[in-house]
Image: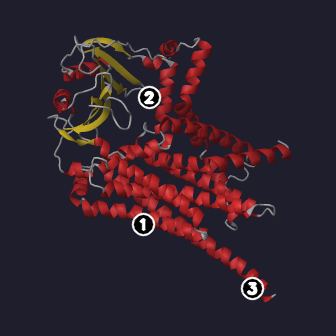
């Protein structure tokens, strides 16, 4: 590669990284935390766990009791899938997702039904509480894949992921000639050298991780683009033919509009386990709940094959099997998507792999940060560089990166101190996260002393993360101790994440202070000289 091409590639790599940096930082920081979202959701439900004595013995779980309770309490909307999630090691309750008929229209959606997400006792079917108010872990995950902006955010993150993929490949080409020669090079003297060496080393060591996430993220966020393209080119616009060819050929039954009791799920569950070769059932769905056309769908993960999900459908009116994906792993599309999903979520090799992905995700955040710092350092040395634009980018970097860390800290704190009885609790927590992020973004532009702002913001973020751990043991000491006594480690895992994030914030604040002190020392002689003259 000649020098001109290398220079152009380096410029493209730097500018792409700068433009996507804040969004990419949010995606990786939120994604790293959401690897443990089930633990965080269980941690948030600690007040409920403390007041319930339950067993997660699968043989005692009764979905029929849960359905009977829901039928008494709600007018279930028929044209919406009804979901039941079995108890897990993180949550001893049955969770139900469905829609209910309402009078008038929902103020948010404008529709004649609204969504319901509740927890029920696994044996009696008694309603324990509203699970929607305790969903901070899944909210962080939502920030990871759509920034909390719905479908528009999903596609936007997909485009950012595409540019990230380009940045990864361009970075590899830039450093290819010196990839092995300078692999362990780390020059501690000089900020730029340290940033550059750390950027290169972490970027190189994490290359398989970065390529995997760039590719899988593209598939998840922009799959609709591929799907439409294939449907138009290969199937003359017939999307159903495309889905059928890909193995997504579940039968569709029209609503009969004749009411029927919803029972027999417990019996079908036992049959489904055998039909799916003893796969562990992780989801039960009912299509057309309450209608004679209702279909019960059981999905599960096979244990003897990597990423193989199987499903079986039964018509509830006669409990006859109408569909089985027992051998769906022979289909390249379905099995391929399964492999991609399990790679992306890191849920196929226990906590060891999740921890590795978590640390690599945080390291990627550091790669993104150092890329911005090097760009700023280089631009600051250019004589024709506008100081105003440079200050704007500097403060935007501070506000975007530190602001999101601060917002997540505020979210964790809100998730612990806001009472679970408040019906709008989830909205309050989400709004506190967005408001905190915007506040820091604005303050970063208004406060002139950027180094002090960074230092205090990081210290405050670290203090809030640490405060949440203290609140756990002050507000819910018996519940936390009970979790440990039952060998459930959701609280310990969540608190370990908080402690690590707190430590990172204080360490970063110390580095900011040290860097500012060095710069002040270096500029002092020049100031003295000017005043003497």
**Is 25 placed left or right of 175 in the picture?**
left
Does 358 appear above or below 498? above
Image quadrant where residue 209 sits: top right
Q: Write the residue at 22% across / 32% down.
A: 58
Q: Sort mark 2 into few (<14), some (14-19) or many (20+) by Cα contacts within 10 Å.
A: many
Location of residue 349 in the rendering, given as x and y in whole percent from the top left corner: 43, 39
* Mark toward the viewer: 1 or 2: 1
Regarding mark 1 in the picture, which secondary structure is present there? helix
Q: Nearer the viewer, residue 341 or 409?
A: 409
Q: Quadrant of the N terminus?
A: top right
Residue reaching furthest bottom? 532
The residue at which mark 1 appears reads as: 463
Q: Write the residue at 39% across / 43% down.
A: 138
Circles 1 and 3, Cβ within 8 Å, touching? The answer is no
How many circles with numbers are drawn on the protein?
3
Q: Quadrant of the C terminus?
A: bottom right
Q: Nearer the viewer, residue 154 or 95?
A: 154
Location of residue 227 in the rendering, given as x and y in whole percent from the top left corner: 55, 22
Residue reaching furthest left? 124
Location of residue 221 in the rendering, given as x and y in whole percent from the top left corner: 53, 33
Q: Write the residue at 31% across / 47% down.
A: 424
- For marks 3 and 2, the one nearer the N-term is 2
The residue at which mark 2 appears reads as: 307
The residue at which mark 3 appears reads as: 528
């Amino acid at each position: 590669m000649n020098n001109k091409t290398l220079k152009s590639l380096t410029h493209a790599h730097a500018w792409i990284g700068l433009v996507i940096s804040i969004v990419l930082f949010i995606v990786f920081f939120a994604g790293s935390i959401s690897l443990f979202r089930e633990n965080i959701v269980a941690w948030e439900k600690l007040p409920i766990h403390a007041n319930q004595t339950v067993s997660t013995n699968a043989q005692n779980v009764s979905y029929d009791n849960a359905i009977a309770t829901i039928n008494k309490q709600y007018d279930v909307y028929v044209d919406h899938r009804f979901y039941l999630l079995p108890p897990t090691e993180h949550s001893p309750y049955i969770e139900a997702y469905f829609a209910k008929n309402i009078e008038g229209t929902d103020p948010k959606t404008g529709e004649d039904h609204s969504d319901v997400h509740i927890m029920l006792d696994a044996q009696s079917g008694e309603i324990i509480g509203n699970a929607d108010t305790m969903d901070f872990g899944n909210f962080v995950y939502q920030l990871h894949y759509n920034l909390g902006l719905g479908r528009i955010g999903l596609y936007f993150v997909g485009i950012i992921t595409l540019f990230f993929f380009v940045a990864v490949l361009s970075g590899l080409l830039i450093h290819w000639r010196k990839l092995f020669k300078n692999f362990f090079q780390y020059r501690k003297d000089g900020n730029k050298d340290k940033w550059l060496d750390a950027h290169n080393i972490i970027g190189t060591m994490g290359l398989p991780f970065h390529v995997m996430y760039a590719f899988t993220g593209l598939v998840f966020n922009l799959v609709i683009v591929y799907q439409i393209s294939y449907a138009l080119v290969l199937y003359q616009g017939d999307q159903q033919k495309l889905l059928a060819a890909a193995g997504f050929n579940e039968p569709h039954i029209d609503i009969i509009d004749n009411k029927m009791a919803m029972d027999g799920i417990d019996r079908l569950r036992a049959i489904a386990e055998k039909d799916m070769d003893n796969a562990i059932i992780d989801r039960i769905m009912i299509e057309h709940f309450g209608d004679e056309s209702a279909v019960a769908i059981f999905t599960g993960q096979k244990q003897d094959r990597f990423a193989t999900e199987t499903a079986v459908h039964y018509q509830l009116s006669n409990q006859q099997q109408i569909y089985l994906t027992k051998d769906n792993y022979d289909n390249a599309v379905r099995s391929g998507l399964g492999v991609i999903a399990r790679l992306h979520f890191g849920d196929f090799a226990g906590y060891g792999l999740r921890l590795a992905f978590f640390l690599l995700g945080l390291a990627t955040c550091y790669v993104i940060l150092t890329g911005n710092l090097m760009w700023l350092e280089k631009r600051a040395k250019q004589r024709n560089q506008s100081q105003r634009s440079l200050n704007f980018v500097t403060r935007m970097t501070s506000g975007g990166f530190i602001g999101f860390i601060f917002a997540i800290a505020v979210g964790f704190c809100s998730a612990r101190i806001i009472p679970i009885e408040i019906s709008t609790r989830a909205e309050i927590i989400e709004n506190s996260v967005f408001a905190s992020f915007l506040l820091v973004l604005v303050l970063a532009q208004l406060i002139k002393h950027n180094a002090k702002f960074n230092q205090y913001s990081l210290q405050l973020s670290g203090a809030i993360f640490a405060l949440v751990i203290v609140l756990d043991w002050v507000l819910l000491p018996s519940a936390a101790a009970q979790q440990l006594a039952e060998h459930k480690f959701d609280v310990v895992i969540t608190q370990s994440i908080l402690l690590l994030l707190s430590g990172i914030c204080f360490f970063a604040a110390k580095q900011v202070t040290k860097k500012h002190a060095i710069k002040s020392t270096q500029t002092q002689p020049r100031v003295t000289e000017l005043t003497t003259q």
